[in-house]
Amino acid sequence: VEMTIRCKSFATNNEPGGVKYFSTKEDTEFNELAFTVGSGQLPAALEEGMMGMRRNSLRRIELPSTAAFAAKKADQLPLPTTKDGKRRFENLFKTDATLLFEVLVTRVK
């Protein structure tokens, strides 16, 4: 999948959906994220929201603050590699941590 994760609590005029802290285009080597559904690599609520998606489908999935905190504790959130992304990720968990995942399925095996 190609994925962008936004911090809803840090919405700005330029980014009303929330400030981006992770993007597969900037934070991964191959511009996509590969995982097995049900493996526990991603939060269960996110996997549930992705059920039924097909190739080239796009969804915006909101992960509530309680689920985001649980996912961070279980190391299920993709980590940013950019300096700004890392700073936003750390600040996110000092406030309301509601996340907005923008997911585009590129391949299904």
Image (cartoon, rainbow, N blue to C red):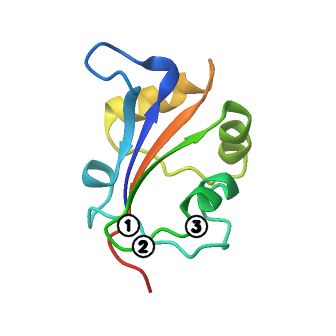
Q: Position of residue 72 (x, y in %)?
A: 65, 43
Q: Which residue is mark 3?
A: 51
Q: Which residue is mark 2?
A: 54
Against 60, is 21 above or below?
above
Near-viewer residue (2 or 90): 2
| Dot 2 amino acid type | Arg
Looking at the rendered structure, which numbered label has been put on residue 105?
Answer: 1
74 to the left or right of 34: right
Q: Position of residue 52 (x, y in %)?
A: 54, 70
| Dot 1 amino acid type | Val
Near-viewer residue (83 or 77): 77
Q: Quadrant of residue 44?
A: bottom right
Near-viewer residue (81 or 65): 65
Against 44, is 88 above or below?
above
Report the residue at 59% width, 30% height from top: 98
| Dot 3 amino acid type | Met
Report the residue at 60% width, 73% height from top: 37
Q: Position of residue 28 (x, y in %)?
A: 32, 58
